[in-house]
Structures are given as structure tokens and as C-alpha cells.
Image (cartoon, rainbow, N blue to C red):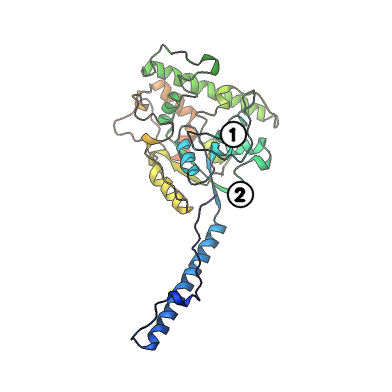
Amino acid sequence: MVAHHESTKTDPFQFDAIPQPSSASPLDGTHELLGSLALQEMKEVESRAERKRAVTKPRLEFVHITKTGGSTVEHVAATVGITWGSCHYMKLEEVGCSSPDLPYEARDYQSYALTSPWHTPPKILKQYVDGSLYPYDDADLFTIVRNPYSRVMSEYYCPWAGFQSQPKYRRGIVHKKDPNDPKVMNVWVKSMVKRLGVAIDDFNAKKGRGKVMNRDSLILAQKHYVNQAEYVYDGDEMIVKHVVHYENLFSEFDALMKKYDINVTLPSKEEGVYSDAKKSRLSYTDLDPEAIALINEFAKVDFEKFGYQMVEKRFEENYSLEAKIIEIE
């Protein structure tokens, strides 16, 4: 849903609105009238062209990969009446979602395809829902990707799926281990990556037996740290047209919004929805060699597809999280 504005038309025959000549030559008034009419005609031609562009411009939809700033994107879109991501499915006051347009009911079991469908890779969601419940039809898709090293750290601190996350029946329990202890963090990262890899293999094995709705493991159903290439590609086909890099979020996002005539801008990362940027926390440089190796193996496709640099055992001082190749079509 691309917001656009139409010029207000005025009646070109309202001559009383045109200044009349006084002591000047009678021809001056005629010249002014003709000039005014010509200017009005040009404005109307431009207005018609603008409306035509708006009609023919494709609709833009957002694919929300976890821990890439997606909630803030959904929020700024909602402020101008655009429904993206989770806003399709529910009212979320903190995000600004107020007018869901697709039905959603949390199931009593975990499903990679249907739990939190706004986080489900489009190619998977399309297989499991009716066409009327698929939000991406007839739209150009865009998403945000992030360096796998910094993304895993954001997952570690995630309040819903990270180290300190707690299921409903354990709310209020305080973790005794220090989340800012590098040893604690590396143990969690290595365990999470291994368990997620096994869960994905299990899902793919089931998928090979046909489209069957299965109870999937919680770690897979939540989609946290699922490879980003799973969202952008279906085999060799790139189904998400525009890939924005988190490391260059503001410039790339602004360029994309300008291309689609959408008048929204992002707040600073410190002011984003669910931001914890001001909190003291570990960084990707605290990952140990074993954790780095597991991430490299698991997220190899993300490093390769999106231009991020892979390291072997440790990070040099000049290591950059930014992708080597940054493109927006």
C-alpha cells in the first residue's frame, strides 16, 4: 500500500481569480489569462501522470527476519497507515499495529509454518496457507539482513528467545548466571546453533514426505536465527526483490522508500521499538573459536549470499560487520 497524494484541481474558468489589468495595455490581461491557463494545464498533466505512476507502481511488502530491526520498520509504516509484518495479524500497541487484516489465532502446538507467520519464510508460508491468507501476493518484497555474528548476539539477548527468555510457567524466575559472562554466552550460542540445525534437518526430512502439518520444536517454530537466505531465496530464485543491510540500514532503507514513494524514515537504533542498545552487553568479538566455527558452518549461505566476511578463529581489529557488496535494485 503505497501512500500518494493527488493535486487539488481548480476550475480554469474562474476568471475572477485572475488579476485584471488596470492602466496597462488590454493585451496584457489576455497574456496573463493565457499564461495562467497554460500553467494550470501543465499542473493537471503532471497530476494525471503522478496518479498513473501510483496506480502502476507495485505494492511493497516487508518480510520480517528476526533481530534485524523489523519491529521498528513495522512501527514507522503503521504511523502512515501501511500494514506490514505482524500488523497484518494482530493489534500491538508498542509497535503501533491497530488494524489487522488477516486472521490469526495462536495454536496450541508449535509450527514452523504457522506460529508467528510474520516470521515465516515466504516460500514456507505459501505452502501451508490459503492464497487469501498469504500477505505477499502481487507485491514486491523487501527484507533486512544482518551479519550472522552480530545477529547471534542480538538473539542471545532477545527477551523472547534468548538466554534470559522464560516460558509463561517460569515468569519471575531470576537467572543465577551472569548474562554478560562470555563463557555463559558461548555455551548458549553453541547449544542454540546445534539444536536449531537439528530441528531444520528434521523439518526438511518431514517435508520430503509431502505437505504434512507437524508439531515442530519450539526453537524452529520461533524462527529465531533461521538462516536469512531461507527468506530471500527459493532454490536459486530470489523471491525477495530488495535486500537492505542492517549495517547500512538508514541509507538503504531511505533509498528504497523513496523509490516506492513511501514517506517514512527510521528513528535511531537507540530509539527503535524494543531497543536495548544503551544496555551494557557483550559483542560479537566475545565469541570463542568454537562458537565462530559453528556459526560459520550453520550460516555459511548467509555469509556467501549477502557479502559478509567470515573469520576463522578470532576477529582482527580492522574486521568490519558491513557487507562487501551492497546493492538495492
Q: Residues within 10 Å of mark 2 (few under 14, many from 20)?
A: few
- The answer to whether residue 203 is above or below residue 68 is above
In this rendered view, identify the residue nearer to me: 83 or 146: 83
Q: Amino acid at mark 1?
A: Pro
Residue 223 location, x and y as percent? 54, 29
Q: Is residue 49 left or right of residue 325?
A: right
Which residue carries the number 2 mark?
A: 138
The residue located at (40%, 13%) in the rendering is 177
Q: Is residue 321 visible?
A: no
Whichever of callouts 1 and 2 sits on the residue coming sooner in the sequence is 1
Is label 2 in a helix, a strand or a loop?
A: loop
Q: Please tell me the numbered disc located at residue 318.
A: none
In this rendered view, identify the residue nearer to me: 244 or 264: 264
Q: Residues within 10 Å of mark 1 (few under 14, many from 20)?
A: many
Pointer 1 with pointer 2, Cβ within 8 A: no
Residue 95 location, x and y as percent? 48, 35
Outermost left residue: 317
The residue located at (29%, 34%) in the rendering is 318
Is label 1 in a helix, a strand or a loop?
A: helix
